[in-house]
Amino acid sequence: MCYKSSMFVDSHCHLEMEAFDRDRKEVIERSLQEGLSYILTVGTEEAYFEKVIEIIDAYPGIYGAIGIHPHNSNDYGESIEKTIRAHLKHQKIVGYGEIGLDFFKNYSPKESQIRAFQAQIDVAKREGLPLIVHSRSAKEETIDILNDAFDGTIEGVGVIHCYSYDVDAAKRFLDMGFYLSMPGTITYKNTEPLIEVMRYLPADRILAETDAPFLTPNPYRGKRNEPRLVKYTIEKIASVRNQSVEETASMLRDNFIRLFLNGTRGGRNCDTNSHSKIERGDKEEATEAYISVRRGDDDEGNKVI
Ligand SMILES: [Zn+2]
Ligand SMILES: [Zn+2]
């Protein structure tokens, strides 16, 4: 099915990863052709930070987040914290993450994951940035750490990306103020607990993501994922919630803008600078800027390659 332009948002992917080195520009152009207005690309380790900046500088509709992923928790320390703080000053870095706990893979020891998670929550709080939380097989520990770090419900505190828990946990994250983001895996068979979550979530707390190059939705499962495929996830959310795809896409877009672009946690994005129109979450102007740069200005586009 063909949709009108600029309606979709990929709230979490990894365009800076090597998987896109060969054809990053084409991937981004295809995403525009297939109706994406915003993409958030998430740098998970120090080696990717510069690439994230390069990409967000080149494309107005693409924003960034940086943080040390739980898999790389062992790397977290004073020197990386300094580097991260310097990059957070960039006006298009609109989230902190992804950070959290992954006790499924356990690529870093649990203790070091917990330490890096807590330390980075502190940095994000001081910077007033929404958290992008990765949590796998660590439901109770994640909830405990977040509850310790934040008092009560905080509007725009962040997102639990690639949400994989049940409705009960969803309620507890919602109570803290978190949004929950649905990955492409909801298009697979046997995702009953997540379907229940999708039905349960309030319209103003749900996001959709690809996590590209990973977690490719059906019908492309097994191939490399890319932002344009977010539409399959959005179609699934629409069918589960008995809404039109257009209505769902606009709900998801509003949520993305509210969480990341409107600076609800301290007005970070409300100052005046060269990106100010986009930072304020002015939908139409931001979209127009994205489209005009991608269609008309090759110098900008070439920076990415
Ligand atoms: Zn993740
Ligand atoms: Zn990710």
Image: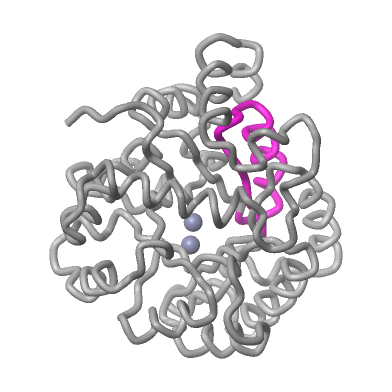
Percent of width and height locating residue 188: 18, 58
On whether residue 243 falls in the magenta region, the answer is no
On whether residue 46 falls in the magenta region, the answer is yes
In the picture as drawn, the residue positioned furthest to the left comes out as 189
Quadrant in the rendering for residue 271:
top right
| Image position of 48 with respect to 79: above or below | above
Left or right: residue 95 versus residue 241 is right
| Image position of 262 with respect to 171: above or below | above
What residue lies at 77% left-to-right and 29% top-to-bottom? 274
What residue lies at 60% left-to-right and 28% top-to-bottom? 59
In what quadrant of the picture does the C terminus appear? top right
What residue lies at 53% left-to-right and 83% top-to-bottom? 142
| Image position of 80 with respect to 280: above or below | below
Percent of width and height locating residue 191: 19, 68
Q: Which residues are magenta?
A: 44-67
What residue lies at 35% left-to-right and 78% top-to-bottom? 165
